[in-house]
Image (spheres, rainbow, N blue to C red):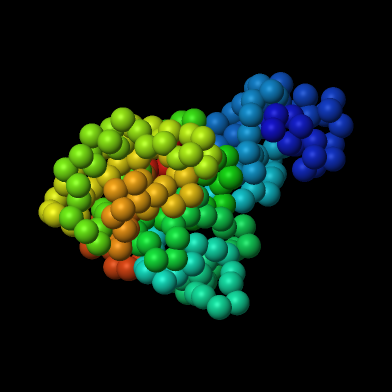
Amino acid sequence: MRLDRFISKTTRESNRQIRIWIQDGQVWVDGQPCLDGTRRVTEFSQIRCNGIDLPCKRAQYWLMNKAAGVLSATRDPEHRTVIEELAAQQPELVLNEIHIAGRLDRASTGLLILTNDGNWSKRLTRPEIKIPKTYLVTTANPINPDTGARFAEGIHFPYEGITTSPAQLTQLSPHQARLTIYEGKYHQIKRMFGVFRNPVVALHRERMGEIVLEPELAPGGCRPLSRQEIDWL
């Protein structure tokens, strides 16, 4: 939203008075004076107007090492959810404002992002941006030698009529590989390995772009994202 419109909605002052405040240097945004009423601000911007701090939300960005069996949801009558996990560790958070950026199914584990910044999370998950996501994949059967080449070409999903973006597979053992994909289609990795009739028995997300899950973070544990991780996106 434009700065002048945000001040108008928050203070109910006239547009004329708001222009005077801005021209006189009485409006500060994030600790700096701002003379441009058209500047874009968000609900998280710290705005001081005529000596008064306007209300703002505190942006929250959390990384969780999702445990197996926990549901990527805000609430569920049967299963424990990642929001409940976060609430147990951070009880001061306004949890009804937190949402999940890039879900994992209940059996999958690893890196999960929780935030109250909708614009930021949209950039993280928007399909056309193609942010790389890296997973450790364990399969029921030995991985076919042709798997890497096929994934690099893209796998066609007839039901949706789409072909996946080229993916990179690094085989680590007969039953385990590290796979980087650039979309987040429904059960995409399981369906890709399904082309070779090789069920995925464990799926662990290690990375989303420049955000990396540390091996020492215990299952179910969480930590705030660093300023560098937030600003990278």
Above or below: residue 2 compared with residue 80: above
The residue lying furthest to the left in this view is 173
Front residue (pair 177, 162): 162
Above or below — where is 87 with respect to 98? below
Which residue shows up at 64% across the image and 25% down it? Answer: 39
What is the x, y in percent for residue 142? 18, 55
Q: Is residue 220 left or right of residue 91?
A: left
Residue 220 percent across, percent down from the top left: 37, 69
- Does residue 147 sit above or below 128 in this rendering? below
Name the quadrant containing residue 89: bottom left
Q: Taking 203 as reference, is 11 left or right?
A: right
Percent x, y of residue 85: 46, 71
Q: Residue at x 64, y 48 (%)?
A: 56
Q: Residue 214 lies in what quarter of the image?
A: bottom left
**Can residue 218 be seen in the rendering of this structure?**
yes
Q: Please state the horizontal and vertical placement of residue 152, each as a whole percent of the image.
A: 28, 33
Relative height, residue 4 to residue 143 (above, below):
above
- Between 147 and 231, the one lying in front of the other is 147
Query: Relative to residue 18, is residue 144 drawn left or right?
Result: left
Q: Which quadrant: the N terminus?
A: top right
| Quarter of the image with the C terminus in it | top left
| 190 displayed left or right of 215 | right
What residue sits 25% from the left and 62% below the top?
140
